[in-house]
Image (tube, grey):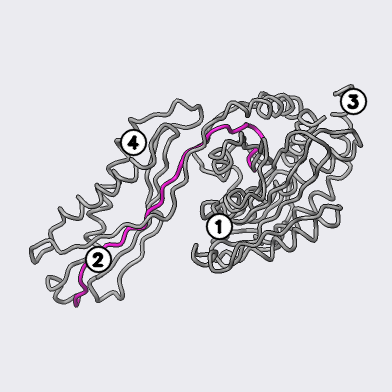
Amino acid sequence: MNPQKYYQALDAWVDAHFDEQVRFLQALVKVPTDTPPGNNAPHADRTTDLLHDFGFDAEKHPVPTQLVKDHGLQSITNLIVRRKYGDGKTIALNAHGDVVPPGEGWTHDPYAGDIVDGQLFGRAAAVSKCDFSTYTFAVRALESLGLPLRGSVELHFTYDEEFGGELGPGWLLSHQLTKPDLMMAAGFSYQVVTAHNGCLQLEVTVQGEMAHAAIPDSGIDALQGAVHILQSLYQLNAQYKQITSHVEGINHPYLNVGQIVGGTNTNVLPGKVVFKLDRRMIPEENPEEVESDIRSLINQAAASFKPPRGGNQLKVSVRRILLANAMVPLKGNAPLVEALQKHGQQVFGEPIPAVGTPLYTDVRLYVERGIPGVIYGAGPRTVLESHAKRADERLALEDLRRATKVVARTLLDLLA
């Protein structure tokens, strides 16, 4: 076999079908998957119909409605497309369709898939409906060669990344619906990610006692109590800067508070405040110890809060929302890393480093089960450039084209 000849054939197929690929991505962007509220089954249905047009049969794996609602969502149907070519390893390609709501500040309709100056705009255009497209068309390109192949490819299109992945890939894996030998998940084009942070999310309820604003000393201000606790939590970030990771691309742990809700009216002393915190954990940290330390600090801060009328009657409860372990590299990922780096450099014309990322992803769910995985797909050099989780999320179409070629070439190396 002359590899270069077939790489060129793959590239030519992607170029010839690129307009079709862009239309496919636009169709995916046009079906909202805002999470919350998390009504994602309609997008899975639309994806199934589009894949059928390519001759791909998608298995639908709905998650039970009550379980989905218990997790704060409305509907989830995960998809598996199995393409078996012969005996050999199975490579899974995973992208998630759920995404945060668009928010404010958009200059383009977040569900139109507008193309301006070579960029496609839309919520989930870059993270990660684009890689529904990357992976689907890479597999189609591979099959266009008509070569005898060893092994299989599976497309895993799932819908629970924003809430932790347990009802997405976690559901498929725990129910033994799939057991690949290698996997690749949605990412960006200019690096192969081999490790990522873990994430702990907690909901903290601070309970005081409501009172009339004219006589505040008759109550216990839950907001003042929450501020007292928050000050202690934010002071941790100075300590976290002294804890560094050995993984390139990952610096140190950090803590943020992303949501605060409380009070009943302007003229009422708040009796209850709820805030949600997000603690990113580097791969070297122990998640159980991190959670235990934060819970202890919250309790200590609550105990040290003294309301004006004396005594200590502030009550605090802590509920875990999410514990996502860090992704650590498995030795078996080397064939994927090496192939992606080789073809990435050839197609993009620059070195493609293997690094860590401070994000957390669904890949950890595969890696925790001993399945070597990496993160690679269509997208810019940084999350900031993509506008992911911000207004005017966008994808450079040239990155989509080139990443599709890189993935197709990689599949050929591993299966031919």
Q: Tell me the quarter of the picture where residue 262 sits.
A: bottom left
At x 75%, y 40%, the residue is 398
Q: Nearer the viewer, mark 4 or mark 2?
A: 2
Q: Nearer the viewer, mark 3 or mark 1?
A: 3
Residue 240 circle label:
4
Q: Earlier in the sequence, mark 2 or mark 1?
A: 1
Disc 1 is placed on an element classified as: loop
* Residue named by callout 3: 5
Q: Position of residue 95 (x, y in %)?
A: 66, 48
Disc 2/disc 3 C-alpha distance (Å): 69 Å
Disc 4/disc 1 C-alpha distance (Å): 28 Å
Q: Amino acid at mark 3?
A: Lys
Q: Position of residue 39 (x, y in %)?
A: 61, 66
Q: Are marks 3 and 1 in contact (CB under 8 Å)?
A: no
Disc 4 is placed on an element classified as: helix
Disc 3 is placed on an element classified as: helix
At x 26%, y 58%, the residue is 226
Q: Amino acid at mark 2?
A: Gln
* Residue named by callout 1: 100
Disc 3/disc 1 C-alpha distance (Å): 42 Å
Residue 207 circle label:
2
Q: Earlier in the sequence, mark 3 or mark 4?
A: 3
